[in-house]
């Protein structure tokens, strides 16, 4: 049976809550903390330049059909560093995305997430993403987790506090075809890693 993974996916696998490792390895050049269990947290916002991340000038990033008129990066001028990317795996068109160099470039409920977080997926380009936290200091659990869900090329990355109620911490905690991500805006659970799952 095929189950469509609307939003961030469908949560079907339940694990017992995994306790947080005591500490991880922090990369001072990225601000990411890589935990022993494979999870990634954001410790600090490190300024960067979108120009340091090759993304192409005209091509749409994603798996879009070439039969559909493409977004042209030269037309993405509403903000600096405009590029084109596929908006969702449920459609076949591209839209403008815009780079950022720090959290100051983003809205108050967003953060400038760089692409070298070490998790599979996400745009190879720093962009403002939804964020309920920006660093570990913003969370009661002292862990501001990096989430990558594969249902969308643009809006698949988020930052969210980890909680004692979470059912997973890293993709390795989930069965094949699933990843650990935010479910219904509350807890981290194993959700479909693509547009659909068996």
Image: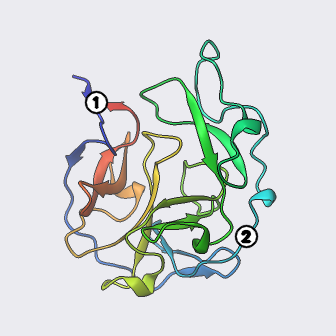
**Drawn side of residue 118 relative to residue 57, left or right:** left
**Drawn side of residue 134 relative to residue 5, left or right:** right
Is residue 22 shown to the viewer in this render?
no
Is residue 173 shown to the viewer in this render?
yes
Query: Tag count in the figure?
Result: 2
Q: Above or below — where is 34 with respect to 52?
A: below
Q: Nearer the viewer, residue 170 or 8?
A: 8
Residue 48, which numbered label?
A: 2
Q: Above or below — where is 88 with respect to 106?
A: above
Q: Quadrant of the N terminus?
A: top left
Q: Quadrant of residue 158?
A: bottom left
Q: Nearer the viewer, residue 140 or 79?
A: 79
Label 1 with label 2: CB-CB less than 8 Å: no
Q: Above or below — where is 11 with respect to 27?
A: above
- Pair 1/2: label in front: 2
Disc 2 crowd rating (10 Å Cα; few below 14, some 14-19, many 20+) is some
Q: Quadrant of the C terminus?
A: top left
**Drawn side of residue 50 relative to residue 91, left or right:** right
**Residue 43 position in % (x across, y down):** 53, 81
What residue is drawn where x is 60% and y is 78%? Answer: 45
Disc 1 crowd rating (10 Å Cα; few below 14, some 14-19, many 20+) is some
N-term-proximal mark, 1 vs 2: 1
**Residue 156 position in % (x across, y down):** 46, 49
What residue is drawn where x is 19% and y is 54%? Answer: 14
Alpha carbon distance from label 1 to label 2: 36 Å
Residue 4, which numbered label?
A: 1
Q: Above or below — where is 104 with respect to 16?
A: below
């Amino acid at each position: 049976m095929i189950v469509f993974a609307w939003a961030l996916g469908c949560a079907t696998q339940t694990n017992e809550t995994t306790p947080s490792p005591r500490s991880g390895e922090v990369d001072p050049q990225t601000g990411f903390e890589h935990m022993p269990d494979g999870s990634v947290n954001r410790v600090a916002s490190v300024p960067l330049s979108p120009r340091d991340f090759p993304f192409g000038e005209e091509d749409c990033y994603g798996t879009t059909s070439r039969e559909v008129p493409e977004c042209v990066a030269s037309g993405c001028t509403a903000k600096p560093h405009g590029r084109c990317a596929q908006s969702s795996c449920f459609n076949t068109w591209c839209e403008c995305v815009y780079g950022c160099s720090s959290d100051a470039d983003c809205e108050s409920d967003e953060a400038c997430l760089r692409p070298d977080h070490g998790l599979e997926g996400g745009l190879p380009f720093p962009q403002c993403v939804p964020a309920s936290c920006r660093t570990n200091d913003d969370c009661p659990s002292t862990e501001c987790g990096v989430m990558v869900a594969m249902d969308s090329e643009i809006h698949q990355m988020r930052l969210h506090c980890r909680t004692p109620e979470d059912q997973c911490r890293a993709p390795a905690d989930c069965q094949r075809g699933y990843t650990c991500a935010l479910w219904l805006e509350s807890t981290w659970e194993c959700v479909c890693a693509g547009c659909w799952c068996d």
